């Protein structure tokens, strides 16, 4: 689902990163995230948008 909220472990798996690397990038504000009770959470739709921005590869819809 687009509005799924995922955990640090899930975002690390999704991005194929070590969990420590994902935590560092999140803490530095390089990955879109928010905190809930001291734990980082991510909206999957924001992560997908971030990936698209980072890759600079046009979407099929952009053509």
Image (cartoon, grey):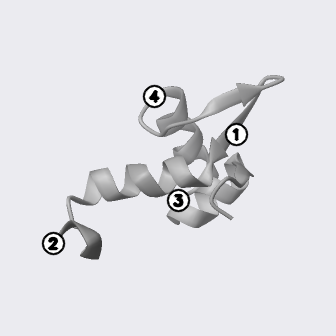
Say if mark 4 contacts mark 3, CB within 8 Å.
no
Residue 23, quarter of the rendered image: top right
Q: Which residue is mark 4?
A: 29
Q: Which residue is mark 3?
A: 17
Which residue: 53% across, 59% down? Answer: 17
Among numbered discs 4 and 1, the one appearing first in the sequence: 4
Say if mark 1 contacts mark 3, CB within 8 Å.
no
Measure the C-alpha gap from mark 2 to mark 4: 30 Å
Q: Is residue 28 above or below residue 58?
A: above
Which residue: 26% across, 76% down? Answer: 60
**Image quadrant where one finds the C terminus:** bottom left
State the image coordinates of residue 47 (x, y, percent, origin top left): 50, 51
Disc 1 versus disc 2: nearer the observer = 2
Among numbered discs 1 and 2, the one appearing first in the sequence: 1
Among numbered discs 1 and 3, the one appearing first in the sequence: 3
Q: Which residue is mark 2?
A: 63
Among numbered discs 2 and 4, the one appearing first in the sequence: 4
Which residue: 41% across, 35% down? Answer: 30
Circle 2: is it few (<14), some (14-19), or many (20+) Cα within 10 Å?
few
């Amino acid at each position: 689902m687009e509005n799924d909220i995922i955990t640090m472990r899930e975002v690390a798996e999704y991005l194929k990163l070590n969990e420590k690397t994902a935590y560092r990038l999140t803490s530095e504000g390089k990955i879109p995230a928010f905190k809930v009770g001291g734990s980082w959470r991510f909206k999957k739709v924001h992560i997908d948008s971030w990936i698209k921005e980072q890759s600079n590869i046009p979407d099929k819809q952009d053509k």
